[in-house]
Image (cartoon, rainbow, N blue to C red):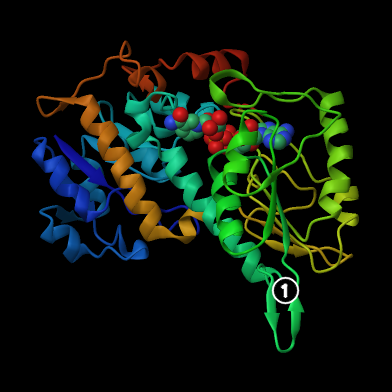
């Protein structure tokens, strides 16, 4: 069976789905590895490194025609979608709950779609496959660095002959994988850090990293299923936005990471919250993306300076800005998942398997992932989940 590694085509995407050190692992399981020429260049893995690892370097048309399984980081583009044929499989971050139309298109082509974001995350055996966590971890680290390099003052307290610099006050909103790494990184840089989340269980994790946990009096627990947050009601959302303003105004830097699976990211910083911040403050919106963001006025991939001097960074895809680390982690995740699904050198689809039940979105011409199928049933053809 031939496993193929594509060169990514999404604008700004520098990651590659598989790195040379994982080629031997797949070959050991009886799989051949094809790599599109130049696939790893932007992440500093050249064709020679893949060839040395015993992968075969091919052109894109050769690869798409010969592949049994195609590994991608992001979703297939229109051209790839058009070139895929029945019986092939695609593994990547396909995000079917936000883009069920893509799942429908892959099913119509008879392609087996396997989405890394569907990995059940509470099983210890799936931790090495958890690409959402590995990429969020990198993004959270980078968010703190981006904030520190944009901020016009020091993060740590510094006592120098030229005077004393007080430490920056940094607030992290959303304390999941990315938020906790942003807290840890800002703390290591010497900032005074606070964290907030609607899941009360995150309090001990925030405090264990040396940060202060902020509790709101107007909003109770919004812990949902599977360790995730549930969406707030309109009343809860307005109360949360209003009470957060005072906390936001007391901080120099705010990093937002809040997400609710399959939903638009919750708005945490309203225009009033931004207006309450001092000139020179920095906001990094990690929720920023095509569905919106956590911050009013943030633009994905852009930096905006507001009229009152607040720099708002729409940090849409920070993991790709550390392409070597992000590709290496993703490659370990995808290889572990793939080897879990391979038996006797072939892909063995088994929706009864607890991991496959989460990741196999389409197979045999149908959308078999129940949550994605339910979304499609509720929508007009070609719609999305928003
Ligand atoms: P995520 O990316 O889905 O969301 C980020 C954070 O935003 C979450 O902590 C969420 O509670 C928070 N959030 C959502 N709405 C909010 C709001 N209105 N206000 C403030 N915060 C809000 O989260 P994630 O990083 O993917 O983690 C989700 C859960 O999965 C966490 O409980 C995490 O500990 C758990 N997890 C477990 C494992 C494991 O057990 N191996 C691995 C990864 C994640």
Q: Residue at x 35, y 44 (%)?
A: 72
Q: Residue at x 15, y 43 (%)?
A: 25
Viewer-closest of 318 and 141: 141
Q: Is residue 289 visible?
A: yes
> Looking at the image, is 155 positioned above or below residue 65?
below
Q: Position of residue 345 (x, y in %)?
A: 11, 29
Viewer-closest of 269 and 369: 269
Secondary structure at numbered mark 1: loop
Q: Is residue 95 visible?
A: no
Q: Is mark 1 within 8 Å of ligand 1?
A: no
Q: Answer with left or right where residue 224 lies relative to residue 239.
A: left
Q: Position of residue 132 (x, y in %)?
A: 46, 38
Viewer-closest of 192 and 172: 192
Query: How crowded is the residue under tag 1: few (<14 C-alpha within 10 Å), some, or many (20+)?
Result: some
Count of numbered marks: 1
Q: Position of residue 331 (x, y in %)?
A: 30, 46
Ligand 1 quarter of the rendering: top right
Q: Residue at x 11, y 61 (%)?
A: 52
**Which quadrant does the N terminus fall into?**
top left
The answer to which image quadrant residue 233 occupies is top right
């Amino acid at each position: 069976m031939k496993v193929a590694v594509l060169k990514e085509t999404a604008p700004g995407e520098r990651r590659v789905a598989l790195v040379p050190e994982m080629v031997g692992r797949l070959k050991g399981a009886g799989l051949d590895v094809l790599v599109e020429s130049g696939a790893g260049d932007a992440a500093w893995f050249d064709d020679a490194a893949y060839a040395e690892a015993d992968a075969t370097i091919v052109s894109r048309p050769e690869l798409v025609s010969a592949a049994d399984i195609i590994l991608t980081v992001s979703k297939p583009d229109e051209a790839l979608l058009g070139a895929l044929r029945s019986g092939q499989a695609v593994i990547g971050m396909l995000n079917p709950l936000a883009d069920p139309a893509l799942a429908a298109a892959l099913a119509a082509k008879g392609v087996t779609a396997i989405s890394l974001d569907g990995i059940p995350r509470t099983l210890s055996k799936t931790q090495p496959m958890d690409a959402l966590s590995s990429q969020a971890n990198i993004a959270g680290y980078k968010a703190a660095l981006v904030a520190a390099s944009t901020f016009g003052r020091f993060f740590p307290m510094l006592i120098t002959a030229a005077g004393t610099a007080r430490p920056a006050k940094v607030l992290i909103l959303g304390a999941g994988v990315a938020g906790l790494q942003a807290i840890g990184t800002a703390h290591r840089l010497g900032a005074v850090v606070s964290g907030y989340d609607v899941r009360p269980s995150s309090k001990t994790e925030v405090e264990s990293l040396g940060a202060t946990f902020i509790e709101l009096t107007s909003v109770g627990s919004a812990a949902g299923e599977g360790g995730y947050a549930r969406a707030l009601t309109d009343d809860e959302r307005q109360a949360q936005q209003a009470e957060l303003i005072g906390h936001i105004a007391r901080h120099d830097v705010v990093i937002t990471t809040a997400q609710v699976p399959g939903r638009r990211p919750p708005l945490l910083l309203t225009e009033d919250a931004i207006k309450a911040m001092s000139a020179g403050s920095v906001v990094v919106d990690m929720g920023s993306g095509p569905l919106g963001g956590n911050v009013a006025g943030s633009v994905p991939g852009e930096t905006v300076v507001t009229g009152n001097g607040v720099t708002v960074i729409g940090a849409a895809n920070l993991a790709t800005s550390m392409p070597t680390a992000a590709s290496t982690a993703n490659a370990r995740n995808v290889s572990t998942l793939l080897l879990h699904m391979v038996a006797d050198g072939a892909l063995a689809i088994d929706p009864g398997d607890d991991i496959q039940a989460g990741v196999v979105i389409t197979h045999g011409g149908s959308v078999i992932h129940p949550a994605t199928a339910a979304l499609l049933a509720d929508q007009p053809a070609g719609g999305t989940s928003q």
